[in-house]
Amino acid sequence: MADYNSSLPVRTETAGDVDVSIYDSTGANAWSIDANNIGQVNLNDGTNSLVIGASGELTADLATGAAVQITDGTDTLAINTDGSLLIGDGTETLAINTDGSVLSQITDGTNALSITASGEITVVQASGNEIQVTDGTETLLVNTDGSVSAQLTDGTDALDINSDGSLTTQISDGTDTLAVNADGSINVVTDATPGTDVHVYGTTAAGVPGTPNSVIDRVQSGAALYIKSIQASCSGKFKVELKTGTDGSETNKAVAFGSTSSGFVQIDFPTPIEVADGDSTLLVVTNNDKSNADVYGFVNGYEV
């Protein structure tokens, strides 16, 4: 058929009775253009066709077993007949598994970081290499035997793991330090008195028999008192009472009796008795003998 040149459109009696083909420079290979009479444009080589649909979609109608290929003339991106996509560098490929997971390996050609099918990350190294995690300046090493060469630091001070697995460590409040000795022991200093020691003494001369004597009457001011012990003494029989609470409404906290043979009583409290700031402490000693006698009392503790 000879070439036909016209500035006017081709008019036919019925649709689709004009065949249009595109040939290569040799004239041997041709693609036919077919409007299909349904709003599609087909490029067809007689076996495979590329269809541009009316809505702009692009589909390929291929011979059985053929694959869609996108190529630059040398390398090719292939869409397989089952719709899968094979991504590779010509030697190794990235495979998408049937369950949708990706079996992947990140490698520099010698060492590889792999994500396994079960989701673990593993490292395959050249023999003798260490795993290094680094910010470009500092490095965390996972050694070939699985140990970690690590230093925990805030940028100034460091917690070191020694070669024998021990820690060189100090526990400090910034002023005082708790040290671990070479034999594994620690030196601990305890303060038996967390506040200011208090020792209050009081006495009443010639205490009348049967008459209570407040040998100590003390109101707290600016601190709480913690009573650890009380003592009382008299030359004869006596009774001693410790009372604490609001001034004028104190209540008994401890009572003891002394005899003629001993003349002394001491009570130690396993848990100190607290007297709040503003409350009072009364130590009352009563002469229970037959004649007047001096009575004495002591309160020991600390204030905080």
Image: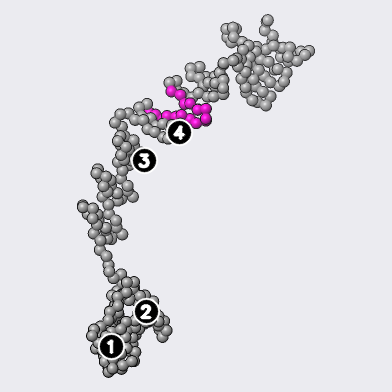
The image shows residue 41 at horizontal and vertical percentages of 67, 19
- Of callouts 3 and 2, which one flags the residue occurring earlier in the amino acid sequence? 3
Identify the residue at horizontal 59%, vertical 9% (top origin). Answer: 29
Is 157 in front, or is 33? 157
- Residue beneath disc 1: 237
Identify the residue at horizontal 39%, vertical 33% (top origin). Answer: 122
In the picture as drawn, the residue positioned furthest to the top comes out as: 1
Marks 3/2: CA–CA distance: 66 Å
- Give the amino acid type for the residue marked by disc 2 in the picture: Lys
Q: Are marks 1 and 3 in contact (CB under 8 Å)?
A: no
Is 180 in front, or is 202? 202
Instruction: Classify residue 31 as left or right of residue 276.
Output: right
- Of callouts 4 and 1, which one flags the residue occurring earlier in the amino acid sequence? 4
Q: Is residue 286 visible?
A: yes
- Residue beneath disc 2: 253
- Of callouts 1 and 3, which one flags the residue occurring earlier in the amino acid sequence? 3
Q: Is residue 221 visible?
A: no
Residue 195 tag number: none
- Residue beneath disc 3: 135
Is 178 in front, or is 271? 271
**Quadrant including the N terminus:** top right
Q: Are marks 3 and 4 in contact (CB under 8 Å)?
A: no
Labels 4, 2: front one: 2
Quarter-wise, where is residue 196 in the image?
bottom left
Residue range in magenta is 92-108
- Residue beneath disc 4: 118
- Give the amino acid type for the residue marked by disc 1 in the picture: Lys
